[in-house]
Amino acid sequence: IIVADVVGAGILAMPVAVANFGLYPGIIALVLLLAANVHISIVMWRVRMFCPSCIGTTTYTAYVRGAFAKAPTWQRRAIISLTGFSQKSFMVGMMVLYLLSAGKGMGMLFYHNHICLPTWMIYAALLLLPFAASARHMGSWQSLVWINVATLMGTVLIPLGFYTIIGTEEIKVPGSEVEMFSDLSLRHVLSGLSTFTFGMTSQFMLVEIIAEMKEPMQMPTAYAKVSAPFQLVMFAVAGIGGYLYMGNKVDGMMNENLPFGGAFQVAAGCMLTHMLISYLIKGVVTCKSVHRAVDRTYAHASDNRPRSWIGWVCIVSSMLVLAWFLANIVPFFGAAVDLLGASVTPISCWLIPLICYMRMSWDYPDWEDSEARKGGRRSKFIKIVEWIVIGIECILALILMIFGTRSSLLTIVEEWETFGEPFECHCEGLWQTCGCSSQHAGMAELCPTTP
C-alpha cells in the first residue's frame, strides 16, 4: 500500500515540474524534495510509535490529538481543527482529480466515440462504485495494489517508449528545447515545487497505513529501502525522461503528448486503471472518516449489520457524486495539481507532522530512550543537524503555502478563459477532430490551417 500510495497522479506532471527548473536544478529539486518527504514520513512514524498518547492511533486526527494531549486546550483544539480541515480538503481534492483523470482516460481510450468528458466521468464513477462500496479497508483488494503500480508504470513508460522508437519531431511543440537551467522565475520555481510536493507526499494518510501494517516497526525500512528508491526511479524516469524528449514547452500529463492511435489508447487504459484504484485507496480513508462523523456506532469497518453497510454505500455514492460535481467545475489537471500542492499539502503533509514531532519532543524529552532500546540511538551531532533540517522544511512549507498558493490562483485566474466553462463538453484531446483537438500531438497534418 505504501508503494502504491506514494506514487500517484502527480508523477504524470513531473516533466512539467522539471521544465519549470531546467534539467540540472530540476534533478536537484527532485532529489532534495524526495529526501524531505522520506524524512518527514519517518518523523511522523516516530510520533506514532513512541509518543505514549499516540500509540495505537488509527486516524490522522487521533494521532494529532495524542501528540497534543499535554498541550493547552486551545492549542489542541486549533491543531485538531486544522488537521481535519486540511486532510479532508486534500483528500477530496485528490478524489476529484482522480475521477477527472479517470474520465479523461476513458475518453482517450475510446476516442472514436464522441462522448463529452462529464459523461465519461459518470461512466468511470459507475465502474468504480462496486469496488468502492465493498472496500472498507485499504487492503480489501490486495491484487489491485499491484495492478495500480503496474498501470502507473505503463502510463509513464509507454509514452517514453513511443518517443524513443518513433521520435518526437512531429509531436513536440515548435521551439521547445531542453535547457540545462531555465530562467528560474519565482512563479516557475513555485509551480515546480508545488508539483513535486503534490506528487511525493503521503503523510495525510500515513497514520492509516501504519495502522493496517502487520509490523509497524518495519515502516522506516519499508519506506526508505523499498518505497523511496522506487519513487526516485519512477519520478526520475518520468520527469527527466519526459523533459528530455519534449523540451521546456511540455504541458499536461505525459500520455496526453502522444498522437491518437494504439499507444495513446494503451497508455489511456493504464491511466484509467491507475486513477480508479488511486481513488479507491484515498476514498476508503475519506469515506471512513465521514462514516464516523455521521453514524459512529455503526462505522466500524468490520461491522456487518445492515445499517452499517447501507450507511457506507450511501456515503461512497455521495462522495462520487460530489467528486463528479467538483470535477466539472474545475476540469483542468495541471493547475489543479499546482493548487493542491501549494495550498493544503504543505499544511497537512509537512507542517502538521513536524509540529507534532516538536510537541512530542517538548512534552516527552526522554522519548528517544524508547527508540534507543529498539536500536535507533542517534548521535548528538545527527540530532542537531536534524533540527536544522526540520527548521528548513518548516520555512519551505510556509513559503510554498503562502506564495505558492497565491501564484497558483493567479495562474488559474489568468488562464480561466482557456479552461472553458464548467460542465462544458471538454472534448479537447478526447476527440480526433480539428474542432476539439487541433493542437493535439500529431494533428498538424489533419488541421494544417490551424495556427
Image: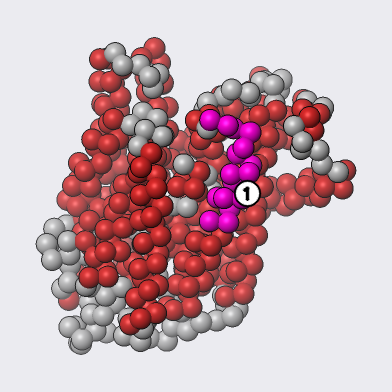
Q: Tell me which segment is drawn in magenta.
A: 214-230
Residue 441 in magenta?
no
Q: Does residue 421 appear in the picture of this structure?
A: no
Horizontal and vertical percent position of residue 293 = 41, 21
Q: Does residue 212 appear in the picture of this structure?
A: yes
Q: Look at the picture and state if 78 lies above or below 180.
A: above
Residue 26 horizontal side relative to residue 114, left or right: right
Q: Quadrant of the C terminus?
A: bottom left
Q: Residues within 10 Å of mark 1 (few under 14, many from 20)?
A: some
**Residue at coordinates 56% horizontally, 75% vertically from top-left?**
22
Task: Tell which residue pokes out farthest to the right in this image.
Answer: 380
**Total residue callouts:** 1
**Residue at coordinates 58% horizontally, 56% vertically from top-left?**
229
Q: Look at the picture and state if 350 lies above or below 243.
A: above
Residue marked by disc 1: 224
Report which quarter residue 254 is drawn in.
Answer: bottom left
Horizontal and vertical percent position of residue 395 = 69, 51
Secondary structure type for disc 1: helix
Report which quarter residue 438 is drawn in.
Answer: bottom left
Q: Main secondary structure of the magenta part?
A: helix
Horizontal and vertical percent position of residue 68 = 67, 25
Say which of 163 and 414 sits in front: 163
Say which of 308 and 175 sits in front: 308
**Residue at coordinates 73% horizontally, 35% vertically from top-left?**
358
